[in-house]
Amino acid sequence: MLQTALESREQAIQLADDMLVDKRAVSVRVTKETLDVQTMEFRSVTIVTKGAPEPPRPKAARDDKSLMVCTAPPDLYTVHARELIGRVLDGWLDRQGLIPFELLHRADLVEQLEASGIELQHALQKIAVPESQSTGQAVHEIIRHYQRLTDQAIERVVRTGRNDGFPNLGAEPIADVARRLANKSDRAFLMGGAIAAAMGGVRGWRAKFELLMNLADTAPEEAEPAALVHVAIEQIMGEIFNVRQGRADVLGATLDVGGQLAAMVRLAVPVEANLLAQADKRVAAVLPPLNGPAARLGEHMARGQYRLLATSLSRRVLRELMGPRRLRPGDPSGEIDVLRTMAMVLTASAGKFLTLEEAQLAFAERSKALVGADFVEAYVGTVGNPLIEADMLVRLCENVTGNSAKRSAARWLIACVSALRFERSLREGEASPGSKLASLADLQSRAQACGLSPKDQAAIHETLGRIGDMVEVQGKVTAQIARAPVPLLQRLALLLRMACGQGCPVGPASNRARAEALRLLKGPELRRVLAGDREAVETLKPLMQAAGLAA
């Protein structure tokens, strides 16, 4: 039975030991469960097993015929089969500039692959060996099965192509073809062959994508014929986006990995992305504009078409976020910007193609890379001003998610503001004491809003308050404001701003400002001033409430 689920490995191991000692269990096991966002299944890794050994479980009898995933040529045209074909034939497909969909629908390509011999044989071996290990069947039996299946599929494509079974889109509009094929049993195969043949006359992924958009724009309006066209086009576009060079050509060759991911997010959820871009200029500055065939695809997806492609793009974004690749290797600050923008858009569209938990898990995993030593050094390494460095680290704390990443980011910030160079820069800097105190107050308030642990918040709060006290004492800011030759209400407003943590960090310095403001509030001069200016009371009241000097 499952006893409990814990975040801490140490607590889980200690609980397992206690259960054995207290004889509440004869054996215990501690496992680490990791969610796979692509399959939404948990991967289990055993950490500790103690106590009596588990008895062996009898293996259930298996029917060898039912273990075969693909048993007929149409099975090779499913999504998972095409993905597997793309992996085992990736080298050959890349050299030819092709995708699995084209290979499965063009007679000239399957004959070319068959003539290569070694490529096809190696692909079958790549499939047979792991399948043999998972099913227990002999490798040679699996190879013979898939060899027969491959021969049947090749013969089907070649026979259809030689008999002019695939429609010619150069001689007949795709709308008419779709209407003519709508009632045929093999309509998807024939429509795929017609589109693949039309793609054979163009070179380059961008040109192929333009052709697909032209076909999509001329699709019939009737539901069934239109679905026949759009389903084939959607499958092809999905495979083009699976090719790294294909993504770059379609979305823009100048975009880095982060730019490509942001563009895919904009394609997948165009309505939410555009609304956020209109409401927030920072989002609009990060989301790359779509042009050419990508812009045309965005128009189709904004109308609710190609939802499977939108789901595929969303999940590809999550896989890239959970991968090791840097999104903007030469621009750490820009990497934070693009991650923040994608997080906002995907969170706003949660439930449409991805759950909120999936998005949060992916960004929490990416956040762990943002608090690594290599990233932080690249992020703040060239900054010479410790105050600017602290500001950048607060921004890092604001934009990472997950308890582990928050703790690591807080440690970087605490190390920065606790360092002697930070204190010395504020003590010896050329800026005025008032501006230094305002900067410290801004850092303190932003750090409090980052969602850090109470312990880390307290450490940052206390350190900034202590340094603010040092700056205020050195510059005698409170005393100078109290004696300044300016109107009383202006002096009081400045002191109240300091007392409530707006003009200086909360701590000893704000306490002195509060005491001086209280002295002015009790003085007879203030009553005379307020008697002649009733509106000043309403102006000062919010500051007095924030400083704790009014109910």
Image (cartoon, helix red, strand yellow):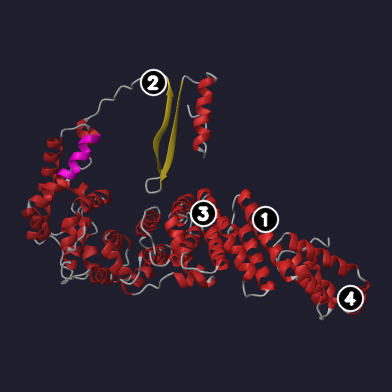
Number of the front mark, 1 or 4 = 1
Sequence-earlier tag: 2 or 1: 2
- In the rendered structure, find residue 53 and report the number of the disc placed on it: 2
Per the rendered image, the range of residues in magenta is: 125-134
Q: Where is residue 118 in the image (x, y as percent from the top left)?
A: 9, 50
Place residue 507 in its image quadrant. bottom right
The residue lying at 71 percent from left, 64 percent from top is: 501
Q: Name the residue under label 3.
A: 401
Specify the amino acid type for callout 1. Answer: Glu
Q: Where is residue 377 in the image (x, y as percent from the top left)?
A: 45, 61
Residue 77 seen anywhere in this rendered image of the structure:
no
Give how far apart the Cα atoms at labels 4 and 3 are.
48 Å
In reply to whether residue 182 is colored magenta, the answer given is no
Q: Where is residue 469 in the image (x, y as percent from the top left)?
A: 71, 63
In reply to whether residue 132 is colored magenta, the answer given is yes
Decide: few, some or many residues near mark 3? Use Cα within 10 Å; few <14, some 14-19, many ≥20.
Answer: many
Q: Name the residue under label 1.
A: 462
The residue lying at 68 percent from left, 68 percent from top is: 437
Q: Is residue 88 above or below residue 24?
A: below
The residue lying at 30 percent from left, 60 percent from top is: 227
Secondary structure at badge 1 equals: helix
